[in-house]
Amino acid sequence: MVVLSLITTAMSPLLAWREPVYIAAGFAGVVALILLLFQPLLAAGILPGLSAQRGRLNHRWVGAALLLSVLVHVAGLYITSPPDVIDALLFASPTPFSLWGVIAMWAIFATAALAGSRQKLKLKARTWRLSHKTLAVVIVLGSVAHAIMIDGTMETLSKTLLCALVMGATAVSLYRPFRR
Amino acid sequence: MTNGRANRRQFLSTAGAVAATGATSLFAPAHANSLKPTRSMRGGSNNYIPNAAIVDRIGGGGFWMTGTVRSAVDGAPLAGQRIQVWAHTTEGHERDPHSHGATLSDANGEFRLEMPQIVPAFGQAHGHLAYDSDDFETVFLRPVLSSAQDTSLSAHFVLKPA
């Protein structure tokens, strides 16, 4: 599914009429959505052949990669059309999908900040898990709404299936008991 | 020629709407001929470049931007008004100067400008239009294509004297 979404995106006719920065920004968004599929699977330790602890270690690295791809996505779009990105960031865009994207972006920033300061804040495991899961739900719902509503380079069927998988993986990991 | 057919249909529906408006005004007070001025749309002025040149067409053409310009005072068509048009097309980004052009409304207040095919950008296939001359208040529009396959788009201006 992951490979299929990348291939169908690479075949998009829209790419012919876009400059490299804009194309890179679009692909960074697709990569972010794909990383979002792996995050709940790694966190819950349900990827075959990966222990729960190894999974959580990888979850951190994939989280960092997710943060990076969102930054590349927004920066690339800003270079392509500054006023459209400013509108989106100020919640003043005519396109509803950008609103969801920006909400998900802030939730990712908040998650990164919280994960980075978790030990300094001496968060209780329960508080940490609850806040992290809440932010994760906001990120997933925001990102899926953002992706589904956009008329962009992703092919519609593979995009819909990928989004369904992301939602399914998130739901499964939320209801799974914590594993050591 | 689907273009011609679409425009004739648009013309007929517009004519019908105008006739209907005329009929109701018979029973309404005298000031009812004034129209609500068109308000600028969100994001309408994005990537605007002032003073786009009046051109016969933008680039290679193949897509039609059409519309009308009327006065908010009495609903009368306004001739000779400069309408500026730009979009992300098969020939360039919104920010590229060669994606911009302008045209004048005719005696019926109608304008038509041929331009390259509009393609989806920033998640929506959309165009930009501006009225930004001295006589009336500035209006920026950002109409969206109902389908990315459409080969025409229309936008209407009701202008309020500045």
Image: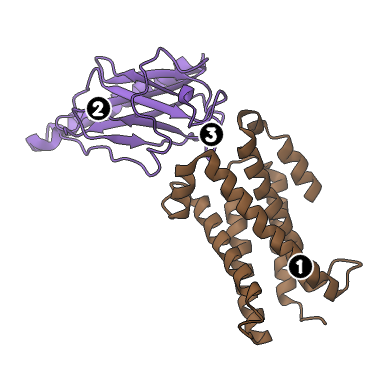
Chain colours: A brown, B purple
Q: Position of residue A60 (x, y in %)?
A: 74, 68
Q: Name the element at disc 1.
A: helix
Which type of secondary structure does the marked residue at label 3 adopt?
loop
The quadrant where residue B27 appears: top left
Q: Which residue occupies 73% across, 34% down?
A: A11
Residue drawn at the location 63% of the way across and 82% of the way down: A120
Q: Amino acid at mark 1?
A: His
Q: Which residue is mark 2?
A: B133
> Which chain does the residue under circle 3 lie in?
B
Please state which amino acid type lies under the numbered disc 2: Ser
What is the chain letter for disc 1? A
Relative to A111, is B108 above or below?
above
Q: Position of residue A142 (x, y in %)?
A: 58, 60
Q: Are marks 1 and 3 on the same chain?
A: no
Q: CA distance from mark 1 to mark 3?
A: 40 Å
Q: Are marks 1 and 2 in contact (CB under 8 Å)?
A: no
User: Which residue extends farthest front?
Assistant: A120
Which residue does the numbered mark 1 point to in the structure image?
Answer: A59
Chain assignment, label 2: B
B24, above or below B19, in the image: below
Asked whether disc 2 touches disc 3, contact meaning CB atoms under 8 Å apart, the reply is no
A45 and A74: which one is in front? A74
Residue that numbered label 3 is attached to? B147
Crowding near the residue tagged with mark 2, few <14, some 14–19, many ≥20 C-alpha atoms within 10 Å: some
User: Image check: A43 left or right of B77?
Assistant: right
Assess disc 3: are there few (<14), some (14-19) or many (≥20) residues with their C-alpha within 10 Å of its C-alpha.
few
> In the figure, B65 relative to A137: above or below?
above
Label 1 packing within 10 angstroms: few (<14), some (14-19), many (20+): many
Marks 2 and 3: which is nearer the front?
Answer: 2
Q: How many marks?
A: 3
